[in-house]
Amino acid sequence: MRMYDIILKKRRGFELTREEIEFFIHGYTAADIPDYQAAAFLMAVFFQGLTPRETADLTLAMAASGDQADLSAVPGRKVDKHSTGGVGDKTTLVLVPLVAAAGVPVAKMSGRGLGHTGGTVDKLESVPGFKVDLSPDDFVAQVRAVGAAVVAQSGNLVPADKKLYALRDVTATVDSIPLIASSVMSKKIAAGGDAIVLDVKAGSGAFMRSAEDAFTLARAMVDIGRLAGRDTVALVTGMDQPLGRSVGNALEVREAIDTLAGRGPADLKELCLALGGQMLTLAGAAPTPEAGSGQLAALLADGRALAKFRDMIAAQGGDPRVIDEPDRLPRAARQETVPSGAAGHVTAIQAEAVGRAAMLLGAGRRTREDRIDHAVGIVLHKKTGDRVEAGEPLATLHVNRTEELDTARRAVQGAYTIGRVLPAQSPLVLGVVG
């Protein structure tokens, strides 16, 4: 078998066999296939696409290229959750203890943030002492004992995806739906869950800007999950404005605590209940997603979800006192308000602009080597549909360094559109696939 023949076959639009796809993934991971041939293959896929079967075969070959989590020692059906990324998206911080409080074990591997989107691991590391690096045995033992754990992805989890993504980034082949779908799902399959719930974002703060593209991606990932033997459901959700009101690591942990205590932002609570209802249904703990959402709402009301988050923090070496004393989380040295330049209603908030402003303050990374400041970020006082007067604060910037302060302030102010007419409210959940 020759890589040249595989490239030519796909370039001509023919369907590849499983053996040909595995030959490519194994050879490229082992450095037996050079970058120039892998780049040619990616470009052929970009233009010719992949069938659902080809995409599933590519995903499984990538998942098998490195370590795979073994969760067989954890009783019950394990349901994983993944978000395609957005601004202020702290749903994992709420969902993991919330679903675990309902008796469904959650073993979650999460990533770090890059650019304008945040990473769950970075957020949890803002809790003093919290350890995100656990051995596989300790990871499984904690899920068995506590019911929940969130750890950083293994360094050898899906190495094929790491190599291919770096190559896609420099060959203009990132925005290929089959390649995006296989990248996401290979990590989910390697993470060992029995079922997968996906949160596919659409809007100005998401990778997929249009709802149409988000639904196409959601269908591709659900198809992969099913062909790989995993029950998979995707919710397509709006990211035309930040989720919740806080953007930044410690600020988002504080908001997650508020949500688990039953006093968080309405949109964050709504999304967590929708995703969590699907997770309970796939785990067999609820007959329908609606019933599952009702169970989870009761756990927010009676304090059991918040207690589970406290247990998880303590088990991973963090200071559980942050649950009752959130001021123990890192705090910025100063706060700067961003005033509105006009009176009216907030008709739009460009989520990406808010995320980039938080990154300028130090809450995110421009490159993977950058160190983040867990204390800084942005708290939004006005969301889409809210009334605002001229000079009234739109947001507060939590600041430690001032080099980019003016740029960040202008970015946040420019992210808001103020109009005279109250805008129509778009639904948060745009649809369900699967």
Image (cartoon, rainbow, N blue to C red):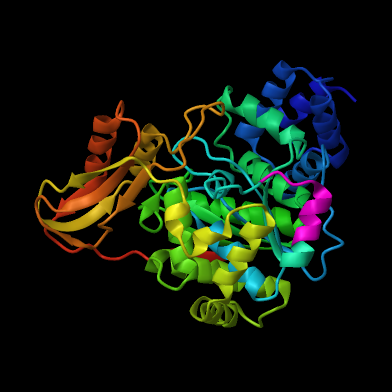
Describe residue 190's horizontal placement relative to residue 248 as left or right.
right
Q: Nearer the viewer, residue 279 or 109?
A: 109
Describe residue 411's horizontal placement relative to residue 286 as left or right.
left
Describe residue 38's horizontal placement relative to residue 396 as left or right.
right
Q: Nearer the viewer, residue 312 or 31?
A: 312
86 within the magenta span: no
Residue at image position (45%, 70%) is 270
Residue 358 placement (x, y as % from top left): 37, 39
Residue 280 placement (x, y as % from top left): 65, 73
Q: Residue furthest right?
A: 1
Q: Which residues are magenta?
A: 132-142
Q: Determine which quarter of the picture holds residue 72.
A: bottom right
Q: Is residue 150 visible?
A: yes
Above or below, comparing residue 397 to residue 163 in the picture: below
Q: Nearer the viewer, residue 401 or 52?
A: 401
Residue 145 placement (x, y as % from top left): 77, 66
Above or below, comparing residue 388 to residue 98 in the picture: above
Is the stretch drawn in magenta largely helix, strand or loop? Answer: helix
Describe residue 291's horizontal placement relative to residue 6 as left or right.
left
Residue at image position (74%, 47%) is 134
Residue at image position (59%, 43%) is 177
Residue 310 placement (x, y as % from top left): 59, 64
On-image quarter of the C terminus: bottom right
Q: How many marks?
A: 0
Above or below, comparing residue 310 to residue 172 in the picture: below
Q: Is residue 88 visible?
A: no
On-image quarter of the N terminus: top right
Residue at image position (40%, 46%) is 331
Q: Nearer the viewer, residue 308 or 34?
A: 308
